[in-house]
Amino acid sequence: MANAWVIRSGRYGERDDWAIANQCSGGGWGEVPDLTSVTSREQLAELLAEIYSDRTPGAVANSVGQVWAIRDRIKPGDIMVMPLKTTQKLAIGRVTGGYRYLAHETDPEKRHVVGVDWIYTDISRSKVRQDLLYTLGSALSVFSPTRGHAVERLSRLLSGQDDPGLVAFVSGGSSGNRSATVLAHVNPEEALEQSEGDEVDILEVARDRISARIEETFVGHDLTGLIKAVLEVDGFTCQMAPPGPDRGIDIVAGKGPLGMDSPRIIVQVKSGAQIGDPVIRDLLGVLHSQGADQGLIVAWGGLSSAAKATVYGQQFRLRAWTAEDIVEAVLRVYDRLPEDIQTRLPLKRVWMLT
């Protein structure tokens, strides 16, 4: 059976769109040169020890394990998963080619890659059971998820199905025995990498769960109601269009008792798939016709490249909130949100040492 891999696309998802558009996965380690001539893990370890001489041996070993995966261990046919920071979705596909060094890339953080055929780029986290989301939440940038029959379950996602959960694979007994056999034959270096992969980014896992809950609970017009509540906590007086055709206006928000003082904002809310440039241009037209000061496009499924470019060109008139921005906005004002919203989205603040 093929292996499964997770490669993150930057701390803030800065390589999300690039990886999908270029049918690849990888990046990072911009200080590291072309590794095509590096043929052993020991050779790589010597190279990285020299490059990262200011780091602890443990940190260097961590980098060696991740970079060697890209250089040698990830093979064509393996499953590749990329958690998308920009949309809070999951991208999943098949590895089509081994290591390549993209010398033509001006950004050194986009040079160490493997080829990937991204079959799905918008899998909702609500389709993935919580234990598998937890496994995918490793703090490593590159790792191979194995816990809880991860490979078999990711294969289901790759075939267009929902994650069936762990129970579907342990009831028969045979597949459980097979997993035990696989783990028994993992070499010590790979076992070390798997144990490192068990270190979970707690903040990311928590945000994943909150994002999934919002997506499940605040569907369609309910998402508009959530955005309206956030804006009202921020001191805006809001009018929300009823369900149905809205003529490009979901929320009208403004300051003052009637909501007619500046800044006057027109809000368009889209809870479905990624939106394109026409939606952004329509909103700009509505801003002009209504005499609004600013516009807010709420796009749970994210924006296309063309839509992002238009938003970027209108930075003093237009803002876009994607899934991650919505979660951030909700967390910022959560304690002041209406009781009915807190009931539907029950959260507890936890403090811990970092």
Image (cartoon, rainbow, N blue to C red):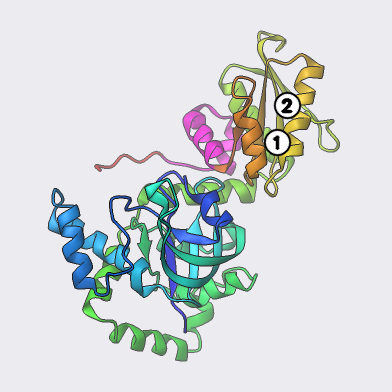
Type of residue at label 2? Ile
Magenta highlight on residue 336: yes
Q: x, y (%) of residue 230?
A: 59, 28
Magenta highlight on residue 189: no
Regarding mark 2 in the picture, which secondary structure is present there? Answer: strand
- How far apart marks 2 and 1 lie (CA) works out to 8 Å
Q: Which residue is mark 2?
A: 251
Q: x, y (%) of residue 59?
A: 20, 56
Q: x, y (%) of residue 174?
A: 46, 91
Region in magenta: 324-348
* Front-most of residues 184 and 114: 114
Q: x, y (%) of residue 76?
A: 48, 76
Answer left or right for 306 relative to 42. right
Q: Which residue is mark 1?
A: 269
Q: Quadrant of residue 65?
A: bottom left
* Front-most of residues 46 and 217: 46
- Above or below for 55 versus 39: above
Seen at 62% across and 35% down, the residue is 309
Q: Are marks 2 and 1 in contact (CB under 8 Å)?
A: yes
Seen at 35% across and 85% down, the residue is 182
State which tag comes first along the sequence, 2 or 1: 2
Residue 217: image tag: none
